[in-house]
Amino acid sequence: MNEIILAKYGEIALKGLNKNTFEERLVGNVKRRLAPLGRFKVKHAQSTLYVIPGENFDVDMAAEKLKTVFGIAKICRAKGFEKNWDIIRDQGVSYVSEQLENAKTFKVEAKRADKKFFMASPEICREMGAAVLERFPHLSVDVKDPDVTVTVEIREENAFVHALKMDGAGGIPVGSSGEAMLLLSGGIDSPVAGYMMAKRGVKISAVHFESPPYTSERARLKVEKLASIMTDYCGDINFYCVPFTQIQEKIRANCAEEYFTVIMRRIMMEVAQRLCEKNSIQALVTGESIGQVASQTMAAMVCTDAVCRMPVFRPVVGMDKKEIVAVSNKIGTFETSIQPYEDCCTVFTPKHPKTRPTLENVRREQNSFDFEPLINEAVENTSLKVIKIS
Ligand code: ATP
Ligand code: MG
């Protein structure tokens, strides 16, 4: 048997009656994610997903890609054997020899899912440990904190041996928890917010507001690039782009400057939720963090949320910038986020935004112009592009 990949479930192993649905979702997500790498099969048993390579399948790349699939806690490269102990022991030790050569200490772990197998777990550990020590006399056993753990799994059809365990992305499979619309700017925070929702199983669509000619084509391409990087974790993303120029110009011409940002944010939310209603999307997501900038005070958020008819999730609300940057680096969006292109928010930034706007004043300012026809027009003229996993 060739080398295969065992992907162990995280939380979904616990989900009781819904487990099948989660499992099917995970299998679908894994198949889509690995499809570009060649032919392979996926099956599942006992809270483990098996990725079985076909011809010319790139196992290294597959293991790498699986690290971004939510719902997987651990990824093991393993070799499968027929259930003949001499073969398991001798060929198993050869298979993990590279890891053992470079280690000082090891232990053996046995998992015996097939309770009919003639050896019990302690016996498997003892015999395998003895075989390892015979081949690698420089090693010593350390059951508490070994450099390498050699695992022998006796399952129904085959036995598996592995010593390479990598962390998966954790979370639950994308698509298990409904769909939300992420307000995606070109900044650092909103891609991280999208990642965090996807981690909890939420499918992500994204909406971006652009104001040409104040914002350039390249600014939008940057945001599309961010969405494309996010597909590693989120899967395909429906990317909605809203023409926002006229609305912003009318805000500037009609409302008091100190309220520009909060009114703009309220209208963004309104447009976003109309797009949600049209597309059966249940909630909004933003990258706001309380107090990060003058427009992100709690008072401003109260005024923004007053227009919302659906939940608004702000998964980075309690994080410091440093923590957000760390996640951004981990998911690979940081370098793109810091490219200096203009955002529609920054084009008409007031010199002194109201940090404690009241709903009454905001409404009064916003009512100085009838935005409704322009909001309709913006929704009508919104474009959709599907950003596919690469
Ligand atoms: P980010 O790093 O996500 O851009 P930020 O700290 O720059 O956030 P703001 O520019 O005040 O903060 O934006 C706050 C949130 O509003 C963003 O996280 C995003 O969810 C949303 N937002 C801002 N500008 C846009 C835009 N042009 N299109 C879509 N959403 C936007
Ligand atoms: Mg921003």
Image (tube, rainbow, N blue to C red):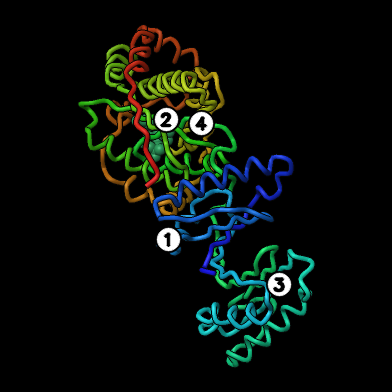
Check disc 4 and report the residue beneath it.
180
> Residue 62: horizontal and vertical position, in percent?
45, 58
Ligand 1 closer than 8 Å to label 3 CB: no
Residues under numbered marks 3 and 4 in contact, where contact means CB atoms less than 8 Å apart: no
Residue 46 lies, with reference to residue 257, above or below; the image says: below
Label 1, label 3: how many angstroms apart (C-alpha)? 29 Å
Q: Quadrant of the N terminus?
A: bottom right
Which amino acid does the dot numbered 1 rest on?
Phe
Circles 3 and 2, Cβ within 8 Å, touching? The answer is no
Q: Is residue 323 left or right of residue 13?
A: left
- The answer for how far apart the CA atoms under marks 1 and 4 are is 34 Å
Residue 12 image position (x, y, % from top left): 65, 47
Q: Secondary structure at mark 2?
A: helix
Of the numbered discs 2 and 4, the one sitting upstream in the chain is 4
Assess whether mark 4 and mark 2 are in contact (beta carbons under 8 angstroms): no
Along the line of sight, which residue is nearer the eye, 360 or 141? 141
**What residue sits right under mark 1 in the picture?**
57
- Distance from Cα at disc 3 to Cα at disc 4: 42 Å
Looking at the rendered structure, the kind of residue marked 2 is Ser
- Give the amino acid at mark 3: Ala
